[in-house]
Image: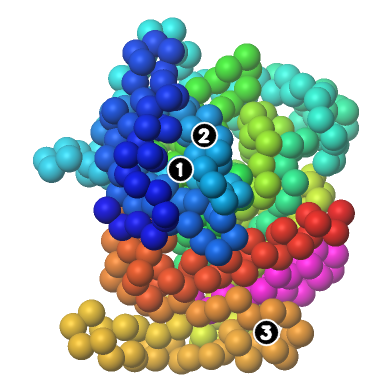
Amino acid sequence: MAQNAPFSSDTLMDLLNTVRTPQSGLSLASAGRLESCTVDDGGRLTLTLTVPREQAPALSALCDEAAKKLQTLPNITSATIILTAHRPAGAPGPSAPAHPPRQAGEQAASPPNAAAQSTGASRGKAPSAAGGHRPLGGAPAAPDAPVLPGVKTIIAVASGKGGVGKSTTAVNLAVGLGMEGLKTGLLDADIHGPSLHRMLGTSGKPEVVEGRLQPMQAWGIRVVSLGMLVDEKAAMIWRGPMVMGAINQLLTDVDWGDLDVMIVDLPPGTGDAHLSLTQKVPLSGAVIVSTPQDIALIDARRGVTMFEKVHVPVLGLVENMSYFCCPNCGHNTELFGHGGARREAEAMGVPFLGEVPLLADIRSSGDSGVPLVIGAPHSEGGKAWRAIAHTVATAVRAMQHST
């Protein structure tokens, strides 16, 4: 077990054993194996457990209460529990996801009924034409229903063009923010190409409770993707109004709960989805992803300009595929050039968040459903995304402190 925390395994597992499922009496300690426990300089504890894949849904419901138990440890300011559920040998791979058996009394997922409750401070209002395009079905929300009332900060991850690693960045940023001690949600707003459910290793459909879609738990964060609700082979042949309607439903029909930060993975480009989001919710900032070559930076520049026009601050640029790191000899090759995003950030007067190399591990992490910051945290890519997440977490805390 990797550990830098000043607590024994027995101390940690004894605390976890005090929180059990009411039906079976299962606990994180009895079902899980302690993989790692780290504590940073700010007293933020991150604990990783390996659990049986079939028990992961039930055990994930215990994480919040168990984290509160861990926060009672000396000098601990916050605690995050991350569950890893490795697929056993011979089990179906991502091309044939295994759906967990439905438990007694569990409601099958269906298009959410958007009878949103008017609780908490409103962050925005649903459109007055609440009964407009609703491609996911369900009853429309009330015209004055609050949008994301429990979410403190909303950050968009965008790119000027496709194929630059935007979704991979969104996944690792969101999980990294969770590891920084922030309650984090991840919304897949890439309507035409939803893929975050696969990249996070989730299977099955979200539950519906009292007409509200419940986010799925993955790697310490809450996540919803259109890919969880539709057949993977289905093509989203939707025009602008349908795209905007789907995004509105993912915002208003989902019971996101209280979150410190929500990461929104936007489609590539600068189209309807971007405008719809900025009209529905007050974005706190945007992260732009680009590769180093000039042709990609042209589109990244358009993305920065778009957010500036709608008065959304750009938190910074990320240079993905900054260089190729040979797994055999360790030599770095600049396949797409190097440093272009840093120079562009300096020219446009926006922060540069960091550079992420091109690694085979990054590709395999997306296919396996284990984000690199979890599966290979000490790799060059894992360290790069952890550093980017730390920078963004610092900015999030600064924004929340100033309001």
Q: Tell whether label 3 touches label 2 (CB within 8 Å).
A: no
- In this figure, which residue is indicated by the disc labeled 1? 81
Q: Secondary structure at mark 3?
A: helix
State how far apart marks 3 and 1 are (Cα).
Answer: 35 Å
In percent of the image, x 79 and y 45: which residue is there? Answer: 280
Three-letter amino acid code of the residue under disc 2: Lys
- Quadrant assignment, res 345: bottom right
Mark 1 packing: few (<14 Cα in 10 Å), some, or many (20+)? Answer: many
Three-letter amino acid code of the residue under disc 1: Ile
In percent of the image, x 43 and y 25: which residue is there? Answer: 18
Residue 235 position within the rendered picture, expressed as x and y whole percent measured from the top left: 46, 44
- In this figure, which residue is indicated by the disc labeled 2? 69
Q: Earlier in the sequence, mark 3 or mark 1?
A: 1
The magenta stretch is 302-320
Q: Is residue 117 left or right of residue 158?
A: right
- The answer to whether residue 77 shows anywhere in this view is yes
In percent of the image, x 78 and y 55: which residue is there? Answer: 400
- In this figure, which residue is indicated by the disc labeled 3? 345
The answer to which of 2 and 291 lies nearer the viewer is: 2
Residue 14 position within the rendered picture, expressed as x and y whole percent measured from the top left: 37, 32
Mark 2 packing: few (<14 Cα in 10 Å), some, or many (20+)? Answer: some
In percent of the image, x 48 and y 57: which residue is there? Answer: 39
The answer to which of 305 and 238 lies nearer the viewer is: 305
Q: Quadrant of the C terminus?
A: bottom right
Three-letter amino acid code of the residue under disc 3: Ala
Q: Tell whether label 2 touches label 1 (CB within 8 Å).
A: no
